[in-house]
Image: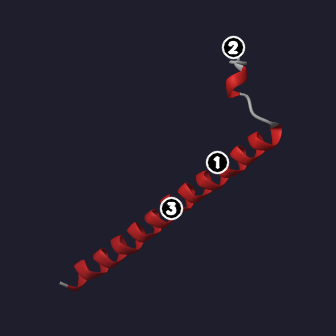
């Protein structure tokens, strides 16, 4: 059930602002994970190449 307490209600523009901020935060988190995976991949390839040299 919805909580319709008047103390916690906010305007539609405030709801849109919060949703937009949350969307930007989520997108930034996704980009951080993607860059971390890319860096890990680069390091893994470099380690494999170094392993073949020795």
Residue situated in front as seen by the camera: 2 or 31:
2
Choose the circle earlier in sequence order: 1 or 2: 2
* Image x and y of residue 4, in percent: 73, 18
Residue situated in front as seen by the camera: 4 or 22:
4
Colour option used: secondary structure
Q: Nearer the viewer, mark 2 or mark 3?
A: 2
* Image x and y of residue 8, in percent: 68, 27
**2 displayed left or right of 51:** right
* Image x and y of residue 40, in percent: 39, 67
**52 displayed left or right of 44:** left
Q: Residue at x 58, y 59 (%)?
A: 28
* Pointer 1 with pointer 2, Cβ within 8 A: no
| Marker disc for residue 14 | none
| Marker disc for residue 22 | 1
Between the C-alphas of marks 1 and 2, the distance is 23 Å
Between the C-alphas of marks 1 and 3, the distance is 15 Å
Label 3's element? helix
Choose the circle earlier in sequence order: 1 or 3: 1
Choose the circle earlier in sequence order: 2 or 3: 2
Q: Residue at x 49, y 66 (%)?
A: 35
Q: Which residue is mark 3?
A: 32
Q: Residue at x 26, y 81 (%)?
A: 50
Between the C-alphas of marks 2 and 3, the distance is 35 Å
Q: Nearer the viewer, mark 1 or mark 3?
A: 1
Graded by Cα atoms within 10 Å as few (under 14), some (14 to 19) or many (20 or more), the crowding at tag 2 reads few
- Identify the image quadrant of residue 10: top right
From this view, report whether residue 52 is shown above or below residue 38. Answer: below
From this view, report whether residue 46 is shown above or below residue 9. Answer: below
| Marker disc for residue 1 | 2
């Amino acid at each position: 059930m919805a909580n319709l307490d008047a103390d916690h209600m906010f305007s539609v523009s405030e709801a849109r602002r919060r949703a937009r901020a949350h969307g930007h935060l989520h997108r930034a988190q996704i980009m951080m994970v993607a860059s971390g995976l890319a860096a890990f991949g680069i390091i893994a390839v470099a380690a494999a190449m170094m392993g073949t040299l020795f």
